[in-house]
Amino acid sequence: MAIFMHATLPGITTDQYDTLNSELQALPGDTFAGCLSHVCVASDSGLEIFDLWESEAAMDKFTTVMMPVAQGLGFPRTGGPPKIAQVHNHWTPGAA
């Protein structure tokens, strides 16, 4: 079942996000396997991340890869755990 995830990352800049994203993309394998959609929005206090995952297991697998990279880059552990909800329906307008 698809999972929607919303994470609030206070104090994180778009430059830090871009660095993390570049590091993750450089890893071998499909680091983002199971991610159906990803949006990063800058706010006055930091970043808001919105993901759609094909399953909670796919999201958890990504998290186990992403967190050590983020910590290695000096990302603070702030914002608390992400909000997660099961998705009733999702579709992309115009997609086949």
Image (tube, rainbow, N blue to C red):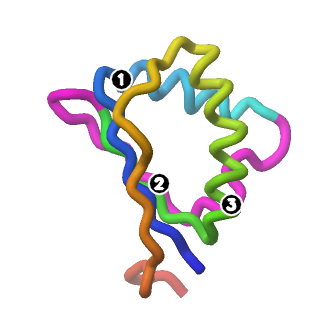
| Circles 2 and 3 in contact, beta carbons < 8 Å | no
Q: Quadrant of the C terminus?
A: bottom right
Is 60 placed left or right of 12 in the picture?
right
Q: Which amino acid is tagged 1?
A: Ile
> Which secondary structure, mark 1?
loop
For label 2, the residue is: 38
**How far apart are the alpha carbons under marks 2 and 1?**
17 Å
For label 3, the residue is: 58
Q: Which amino acid is tagged 2?
A: His
Disc 2: CA contacts within 10 A as few (<14), some (14-19) or many (>=20):
few
Residue 27, position as x, y percentages in the image: 77, 32
Q: What's drawn in magenta, residue-wise?
A: 28-46
For label 1, the residue is: 12
Vertical relation: 8 (above or below) 76: below
Mark 2 or 1, nearer chain start = 1
Vertical relation: 10 (above or below) 62: above
